[in-house]
Structures are given as C-alpha cells and as structure tokens.
Amino acid sequence: MAAAALMVAAMAGAPGTARAQTVVVIVNGDPVTTYDIDQRTRLMQISTQRSPSRQEVLNELIDEKLKIQLLRRYTIDAIDNDVENAFNNMARRSNMSPAQFGEQLAKANVSTGTLKSRMKAEIVWSQVIRGRFMANSQVSEKDILAKLETRKPEDQGQFGFDYTLRPILFVVPRRSSGATFEARRKDAETLRTRFLNCQDGIALARSLRDVAVRATVVRSSADLPPQLRELLEKTEIGRLTAPEATSQGVEVYALCDKKPSRADNTPGKREAREELMTAQFQNHSKRYIKELRSQAMIEHK
C-alpha cells in the first residue's frame, strides 16, 4: 500500500465521485453501497496501477465486511490506534505528514476512511488468523533447509549480525491527533541530529520530557523484519534509526554495537522460515474466508 502514495498525484485530475448511497449488497446486515464500490475502485486503481472489475471490487468489499465483523466475536485492543499508526507510517514512508497524505488522497477523490477501512480489516484479519490458526504452527528445520536449496547459492547464507539496541520512546497519549504524532516525530528527528554516541546520547534522551529509554536488547538480523534489518544496516554505530510511529508513541533505536551472528542464524534462514509461515497463513486465510462466506447472509439488491 505504500505504493499508493506514489500514484495519488496521477489520479488528482480524476472527476469527482458521485456520493449516491444506493445499496448493492447487504452482508450480515451491513450495507455495501455504490459509493463504497466507487471509492474502493479508485483505491485499487491507485494501489495496483490497474482497473479492477466491478465483481473484483465487490468481492473485496464483502470480504472486508466479514473481516471487520469478527470484532463482534473477538476483542482486539487498541484497534483504532493501530489503524492510525499504520496510516501515519504509510504517510511517513511517502515523505508526507498524515494531513498531507490525506490531502493527496482527497485530490484523487478517495476518502481517508476508505483506506483506513481496508487497513482495519487487514489488521483484524491478521490477528484473528494468527491467534486462531497460527499460534501453534511450526516450521521444521528440514523444511527450512529444503526451502533454502531452491535458492541461488549466493542467497542461501546471507551473513548476519547481532545488534545491541536501546529503544527510545517519545510517548504520545492514547487517542492523540495526527498532529501530536507529527510533533513528536519532529522531536525525535531533533534528537537524531544531536545523538552522536550511545554514552552521551542516552543521557541526553533521558533528560527530555515524556521520553522513555528502555533496557538494552540484543537482536539478531535473522530475527528482524526486512524493513528494520535494512534500516539497521544503514545506521552507523552510535546513531539513531529513523522515527517510527507505534501504539505508544514515536520510537527510535540507538544502535550501540554490532557483531557477526553465528553461522546457523542468518537472514536467509529467517526469510525461508517466513515464506513457509506466509504460505501457511495464506492457506488458513483462504479456508476461513470461504467458511465465513458460507455462513454469512449475503443479500444482493
């Protein structure tokens, strides 16, 4: 979805959306309207750079209703905060503030609510699938090695590192506005310019208001998501990573040390494990959405 921002400007000249609310389908009592279809069509055009069929759009909206309706069965804490953080992070990766990102969407005649609804559905779905089906899932070492054998020899090892990190959190109260997050992000960026080594920098961070310096953690590059691993690879020892919005505020990491990992703990193995787990997730996801559809009352108008 981060690619969406790159296509928004190209859609800016599109004609305005008719805000008719004609109901097209009802999913367990929740309506999907022609306006919803028009909005989702535009969003899919931006994010996929192609024009989806009406049935494809309608199928996504029906599935989205079913996913969000799972909140009636399961309690997911701070779901709205998670959506706002996801939106803010997407804006930041597009080099925009949340307000600017929303303005660009508006120029493409896409409401922020349309994007946030999709985000909410995927966050709910991911947590439900992982909690319901994936909690006890395991990938064997044999499966990982077999997966590695399908790769090119130069991609199998991928030498890794153990990073010594100090998480630094710029606290943001719950239900704060995007402007508050943006102000704290600027505070974090200011600290980055002044943070030259861990000894002096940690002391400086502790002197700041509403900033929490957490205990030292050691993380292997094999256990980090690719985005964070790439970020740390580009960060000098003694400096801070770029700010990232979380459910508690804006967080940066001080990279205080970096050492080679042991040979059996590499990013290559992690990526192979993630690919296998992703395949399991997708299989469970397909089966469960099919089950929900079979149980749902879906009335086409």
Image (tube, rainbow, N blue to C red):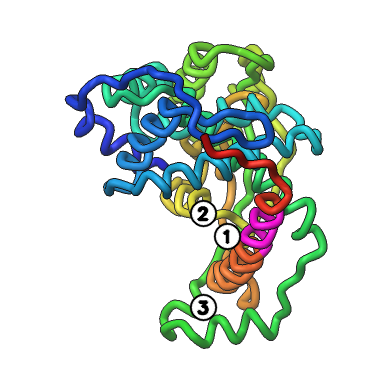
Residue drawn where x is 43% and y is 21% of the image: 98
Residue 299: image quadrant is: top right
Identify the residue under disc 3: 157
Amino acid type of disc 2? Arg
Amino acid type of disc 3? Gly
| Of callouts 1 and 3, the N-terminal one | 3
Q: Could you classify mark 3 by the number of other residues whose Cα lies within 10 Å: few (under 14), some (14-19), or many (20 or more)?
A: some
Judged by its main secondary structure, the magenta piece is helix
Tell me where residue 136 appears, x and y as whole percent: 82, 63
Residue 26: image quadrant is: top right
Q: Is residue 281 above or below residue 15?
A: below
Q: Which mark is residue 221?
A: 1
Q: In the image shown, does 7 or 154 lie closer to the viewer?
A: 7
Q: Is residue 35 above or below residue 267?
A: above
| Of callouts 1 and 2, the N-terminal one | 1
- Is residue 158 found left or right of 6 in the rendered image? right
Q: Could you classify mark 2 by the number of other residues whose Cα lies within 10 Å: few (under 14), some (14-19), or many (20 or more)?
A: many
- Is residue 259 found left or right of 106 in the rendered image? right
Q: Is residue 259 magenta?
A: no
Magenta stretch in the rendered image: 284-291
Residue that protrudes farthest toward the front in the picture: 301
Residue drawn where x is 50% and y is 56% of the image: 226
Tell me where residue 38 appears, x and y as whole percent: 36, 31
Quarter placement of the N terminus: top left
Tell me where residue 241 appears, x and y as whole percent: 49, 39
| Of callouts 3 and 2, the N-terminal one | 3
Label 1 element class: helix
- Is residue 43 found left or right of 86 in the rendered image? left
Q: Are marks 1 and 2 in contact (CB under 8 Å)?
A: yes
Tell me where residue 227 appears, x and y as whole percent: 48, 50
Identify the residue under disc 2: 229
| Cα gap from disc 1 to disc 3, whole angstroms | 12 Å
